[in-house]
Amino acid sequence: MGENNIILNIKSLSKHFGALKAVDEVSFEVKRGEILGLIGPNGAGKTTITNLVTGTYLKNSGSIVFEGAEISNLQSYQIARKGLTRTFQVVKPLIGMSVEENILVGSLYGRDNRNTDMKNASKRTGEIIKLVGLERKKDFLVSDITLPDLKKMEFARVLAMEPKVLFLDEVMAGLNPTEVEETSILVKRIRKEKELTIVFIEHIMKAVMGISDRIVVLHHGRKITGGTPQEVVNSPAVIEAYLGKRYAKEVNNEG
Amino acid sequence: MLLNNKKVNIFSLIVGIIILIFLPRFISGYWVRVITTIFMFAVVSQGMNIMYGYMGYLPFGNIMFFGIGAYITAIGMSRGLSFLAVLPLSALTAIFFSIIFGFPMLKIRGHYFAIATIGINGALMAVVQNTTEITGGAMGTTLPIINKPPEVTNNYFYFGMLALMLITTLVIYLVTKSKFGFGIRSIKANEEAANSMGINTTYHKVTAWAISSLFTSIAGALYAYWMSFIGPTEVFSTVFAVNVIVIMLIGGAGYVLGPIIGAFVVSLLSEVVWSAFLEYHLAVLGITMIIILFFVPKGIAGAVTDFIKNRELRLRKKVSV
Amino acid sequence: MILQMITNAFLVGGIYALMGIGFSLQWGISGIINLSYGAMVILGAYISLECFNIFQIDPFVSMIISGAILFVIGAIIYRRLLQPLLKGGIIFTLILTFAVRLIVENITLKVWSANYRNLTLSYTGSNFQIGDVFFPLTKVLVFLIAIVLIYLTYLFMTNTKTGKGIQAVALDTEGAQAVGIDVEKMYLINFAFGTALAGVTGSLWASIYNFSPHLINAITGKVFIIAILGGLGNIWGAAVGGLFLGIAETAGLVFFGAEWQEAIGLVIMVGILIWRPYGLIGKKFFG
């Protein structure tokens, strides 16, 4: 039953800013429950696609189908309520509010606008705070915590929304290797426990290779290939353009 | 709440309200009227507070709703309607305008919104000034005078405005604790993030403005009934609008009690300034605004809250060591 | 009749354009919505009044003095009041500049009273005539000077090192910094320049109209409209905006009467704000 298996279907999606083709006829599918890595150099169009899918940008052409319904004409908040959400490359905390309050907002709104009940929302917020390990910092104002904690908080915030599909936009930027490792483990764990589908945008190759089920590679707004990590790593075009022989060898040795 | 001890808070609030209820017995008619005006300013400032303090959108020209409330009441009552009959009419008209203007205007960025409200307020004032047959034009219009002795009238409006102030403050308090309140605060915190989290920001903005317009217009309606005479430059006045903003800032924008504190402080200060500096009141107002922005940007409520939080943190540190 | 209307519209459009450019530059480039702008214009008018009454200096000469004084005042306001509070956001600057306006308004009221003043020059009242159309001499002079000043402003922005610096900062703050431009200094000079234009406009205004602190509201309203119509930071846009306002006011005067003038202006402004926040001209001149 192919239809049910594909939760997000992007077909011939295009977005240009004046003469610049940020996204050029990109098509790919996201299977329910998978972690799909989305890679490519800066300017390849990864964040633009995220913005298009989540309603921040308006497409020029193509279609975005989520659970069988076209969503490209919906507004951000409507898409979020359907269960499709994202984190931001440059974190966007709710300034002036505490860590706990930030996550609470995610819990109050989010999928199907659920949890109108403050009590329920508070309870769920408490659970998620424990899950990501922010208990000691929950009353801190977001202006008073470090970047890794901000990223954790934003991650917790989107989880509190109970999404079905989550776009993680460079969650690892600015983290040290230990933190990267921790985040990788957390992402895999969350995917399993929450039955999420994750689109994972990242530059840190080791992380992407390590946790993605499949990978889509973008360059200059176009998709140049897609497949399992092994297939992508061995694709001549990709090796040549991005990975460099060193990474290709490393993964081959481990794999 | 300012203090973290809930029982102390509720106790002091009740004490405060009781004092206010019995106050008229002990003070002269002049002061009863002054304090009634304080209550009124607190209400209008609360209307500004929910929009700016909590949501981050400054409706500079928000007094347009005050003017609408005043004029609908004036027109209605001079045509024989009772106050209780015109009151809902005034409020609904104001809400109607807030929605009609709100939808297009709240979609644009914050500072454009602020200026656009100044424009609409000015336009409304001009419209009132020019439709003389209905509104009395620039000369103003009168309402039926209340045939009661002054003490009774004074008290009637004192308690009316007091009730309005308490109800408005209660509503604002409940809103800020509610899910809707979190939505509004998220808009101020980061509107783009709020959208991505599933918050329908347009709905929140328009509703917040409707609430704001509701209370502001009722204050205007009461004012018109009280004064028995209103004029367009008075109820749509820019200086009035500025006073309201100053009150909100001094008391503390984004704090429930801010407008009340601000109204008391500013009005009492004004009494002093008026008698001492009559010719310089504009400059004093301006200098005061600058001083607040530089030294007490969070207002009195904010400064007190911060002080208490810091004291708690220091105590906690001592205990844990 | 129509020709006279058009002439009047253009003549007033000139001074409006000059006025609007200063405000537009401050808003579009320095990012400050200067609610004290109207007060600055009036201040310029009063400076010329004193120069005329005490030293018999013609306003077309004393406008240089006004410009210089207002430049300094603008620089002080920006450096001492606005810069420290920029972190408070645009709302803070709105309130701050409004506070400055109140102070200046109070000073002008105290020193010169609320009475309307005017400057009667030896050539005030002389006209020349082309066909059926009257050209008041002073208004023509003001128009010509305004055009020259607008052009000089354009040259300043595009041909001098400072002007190009300002342009660079407006287009790309980080890029400008990277090539060694003192960004804050550019914002400062731009703002002070805007205030200077206000002062100059005030002097010109004094030579053709009467004035009083009561005009502060109306003038502030006008510069808002002009800046928004023309797109913020856009010199030629503001010029067109000024002309447009001149036409709208003249036509409004003829067709609707003086009372509705202000209302119409405000309605136009709100309409533009809602439907085209970038102004009639389109994208900002400086990106």
Image (cartoon, coloured by chain):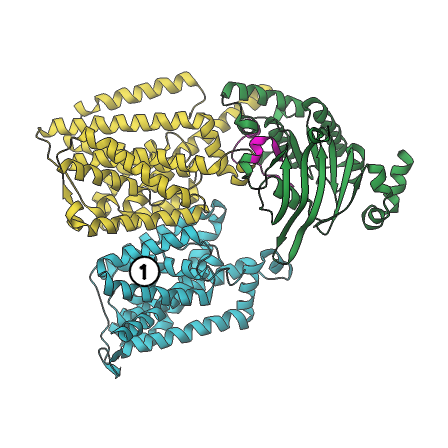
Chain colours: A green, B yellow, C cyan
Question: Residue C110 location in percent, x, y?
Answer: 24, 57
**One can see residue B38 in this view:** no
Q: Which residue is mark 1?
A: C219
Horizontal relation, residue C144 to residue A68: left or right: left
Q: Residues within 10 Å of mark 1 (few under 14, many from 20)?
A: some
Chain hosting mark 1: C
In the image, is residue B139 above or below residue C168? above
Corner quadrant of residue C4? bottom left
Q: Residue at x 54, y 22 (%)?
A: A121
In the image, is residue A133 above or below residue A150? above
Q: Nearer the viewer, residue B156 or A6?
A: A6
Asked if residue A86 lies in the magenta stretch, the reply is yes
Q: Secondary structure at mark 1?
A: helix
Question: Residue C63 location in percent, x, y?
Answer: 35, 72
Q: Nearer the viewer, residue B41 or A171?
A: A171
Corner quadrant of residue C208? bottom left
Question: Residue C259 location in percent, x, y?
Answer: 22, 57
Q: Which quarter of the image is occupied by the C terminus of chain B?
A: top right
What amino acid is at disc 1? Ile
Horizontal relation, residue B246 to residue B157: left or right: right
Q: Which quarter of the image is occupied by the N terminus of chain B?
A: top left
Horizontal relation, residue A1 to residue A134: left or right: right
Q: Residue at x 54, y 35 (%)?
A: A78
**One can see residue C241 in this view:** yes
Q: Residue at x 21, y 36 (%)?
A: B223
Which segment did they paint magenta? A79-104
